[in-house]
């Protein structure tokens, strides 16, 4: 692979135990609608909901995933969602059923972040430049 200055992540998945509960949490916290992912017929072991995306645009998108054998929480990957001001979404976390782990904090010239856990025990971040 050439040494290119591009962001290497092209997709993410957040594993959940209760799809309806997790979908409501992210929709309430981030104020965006998740949509059904079309899956092959007959596979009842997998359920996915897309985050809004433009698959040909720069950046990454992903999905909530419920799959037999892959439990939620306890993972070591942290997904950060983009925001105009991360304190706004951070302020919605607890009302949506999650836990605020760290309120908005400066990361210097790279902006600000806030951390929370969702209803499934997954930690996630919110990033903003303001």
Image: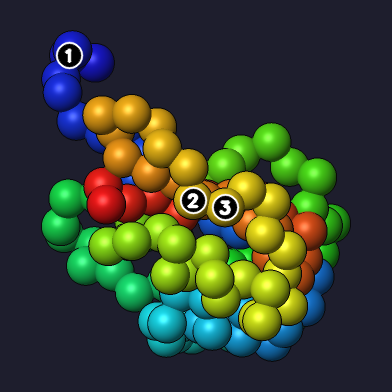
- The image's mark for residue 2 is 1
Evaluate if marks 3 and 2 touch, with contact meaning CB atoms under 8 Å apart.
yes
- The image's mark for residue 104 is 2
Q: Label 1: how many residues lie within 10 Å, few (<14), some (14-19) or many (20+)? A: few
The span from disc 2 to disc 1 (Cα, nearest Å) is: 36 Å
Read off the residue under disc 3: 103
Q: Residue at x 48, y 42 (%)?
A: 105
- Sequence order check, earlier mark of 2 and 1: 1
Evaluate if marks 3 and 1 touch, with contact meaning CB atoms under 8 Å apart.
no
- The image quarter in which residue 116 lies: bottom right
Residue 51, visible in the rendered structure:
yes
60 to 25, vertically: above or below: above
- Sequence order check, earlier mark of 3 and 1: 1
Q: Label 2: how many residues lie within 10 Å, few (<14), some (14-19) or many (20+)? A: many
Q: Residue at x 21, y 67 (%)?
A: 54
Q: Nearer the viewer, mark 3 or mark 1?
A: 3
40 and 104: which one is in front?
A: 104
Secondary-structure class at tag 3: strand
Side (left or right) of 83 relative to 102: left
């Amino acid at each position: 692979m050439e040494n290119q200055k591009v962001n290497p992540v092209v997709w993410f998945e957040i594993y959940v135990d209760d799809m309806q509960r997790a979908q409501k949490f992210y929709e309430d916290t981030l104020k965006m609608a998740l949509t059904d992912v079309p899956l092959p017929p007959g596979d009842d072991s997998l359920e996915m909901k897309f985050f809004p995306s433009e698959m040909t645009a720069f950046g990454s998108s992903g999905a909530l995933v419920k799959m037999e054998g892959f439990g939620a929480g306890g993972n070591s990957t942290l997904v950060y969602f983009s925001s105009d001001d991360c304190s706004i979404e951070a302020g919605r976390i607890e009302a949506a059923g999650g836990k605020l782990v760290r309120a908005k904090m400066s990361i210097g010239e790279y902006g600000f972040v806030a951390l929370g856990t969702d209803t499934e025990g997954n930690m996630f971040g919110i990033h903003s430049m303001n």
